[in-house]
Image: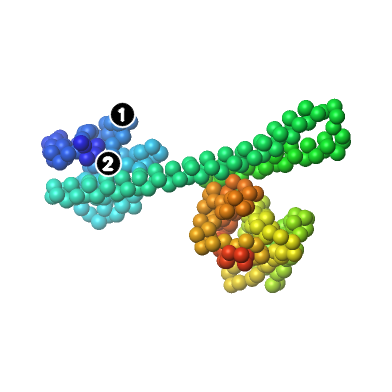
Amino acid sequence: MSKGYILVVEDHQLLLEAIQDLLQVNGYEVAMANNGFAALDAIKKRPPDLILSDITMPQMDGYDLYQKVRENPSWVRIPFIFLTARGERTDVLRGKALGVEDYIVKPFDTEDLLVAIESRLGRARAIRQAADVEFEQLKQQILNVLSHELRTPLTYIAGYTDLALEDAGSLSLEELQEFLLGIKRGSDRLTKLVKDMLLVVQIDTGRTAEEFRTYANVRPHLESYVQHIVESFVPAAQAAGITLQYSSTGECPPTRIHEEFLGNALGRIIENAIKFSHGPNKRVTVETRNLPGWIEIAVTDQGVGLAPDAIKNIFKRFQQFDREVMEQQGAGLGMFIAHSLVQLHGGEITVVSEPGQGSTFTVRIPVTSG
């Protein structure tokens, strides 16, 4: 059984053949190329497990070959070892700065070469296995969450629509209104899910970062902005029997924000504080505080609280806790989105919580220097 498929790129034919013999004797499958262009053709036909390449070659040198390989997302994980007669520190540093996994200077000891290859292949296998496990876990989370989050609102919509159609002629105005409200609840939930999924895609692709750079502005008096956001959630809090209060320690210094993004993040935190504060006569407080170099916005609830394991994973995507108790959790993207949007501001979110005692989520945004 082959220990791995290696592409050797070397313009010196005798050395190329010698390396081929060495690797084949030691259980590797080998492809050969005598320049960068031939190497790219070989990779297109069959991506190798590792590339061992000379630097000084005609037409396309090793540095250019490396950059061409890394430009292709399908090849970005292929380990790359430079094999060269150059031993100068500047050449070694340039290779490492590019991200090359290893750098072996000719003439080399065969054992050193074999150890370097096995080490890099082992590391690549470990990374690939870890990524596969993580991908499978994420895929399962997506399937579990979305199957519920899609099925529930669709049940609302389909059920109320069928009832309305079956009894259209005998429905009173109040009954028809009830059916329409049920359809709207399902529609709103689906709309929110779609918007959140699209926002996650924009975060992952860098679109939100680009928008932040383009549209963020320096804003004074952040306390009034936060107060406006808090006030928009007062009706929802009152409907849940919860008192929502806002306070500030004073006038905030200027800070650079994207108002839509920061409002989105704060809104999700406040909404969660209300949602998870079960029972009447509970209180949610939002406080803006000035610290040296920072503005803090703390959201404290008297809700169900979080266990240590939940705190550790709270800002990961598709995270839900006690689904059987807390059914209205959404897709588990809210805190991931909030955390990502706050990070765009150069800020952070921290959480302190205790099961049964409530939680405090604290957003920190840097003030504008100069």
Task: Say left or right for 38 vs 277.
Answer: left
Q: Is disc 2 in contact with disc 1, using a CB cutoff of under 8 Å? A: no
Residue 53 lies in what quarter of the image? Answer: top left
**Circle 2: residue type:** Leu
Task: Say left or right for 42 vs 153.
Answer: left
**Circle 1: residue type:** Lys
Q: Quadrant of the N terminus?
A: top left
- Residue at 62% x, 59% y: name it: 256
Whether residue 114 is situated above or below residue 266 in the rendered picture: above
Density class for disc 2 (Cα within 10 Å; few <14, some 14-19, many ≥20) is many
- Residue at 70% x, 32% y: name it: 158
Q: Which residue is mark 2?
A: 50
- Disc 2 to disc 1, C-alpha distance: 15 Å
Q: Position of residue 37 (x, y in %)?
A: 29, 32
- Residue at 71% x, 60% y: name it: 279
Density class for disc 1 (Cα within 10 Å; few <14, some 14-19, many ≥20) is few
Q: In the structure shown, which secondary structural element does the residue marked by tag 1 occupy?
A: helix
Q: Position of residue 100 (x, y in %)?
A: 30, 48
Q: Residue furthest right?
A: 173
- Residue at 85% x, 27% y: name it: 169
Q: Which residue is mark 1?
A: 45
Residue closest to the eye, 362 or 165? 165
Residue closest to the eye, 327 or 273? 327
Residue closest to the eye, 339 or 358? 358
The answer to whether one can see residue 76 in this image is yes
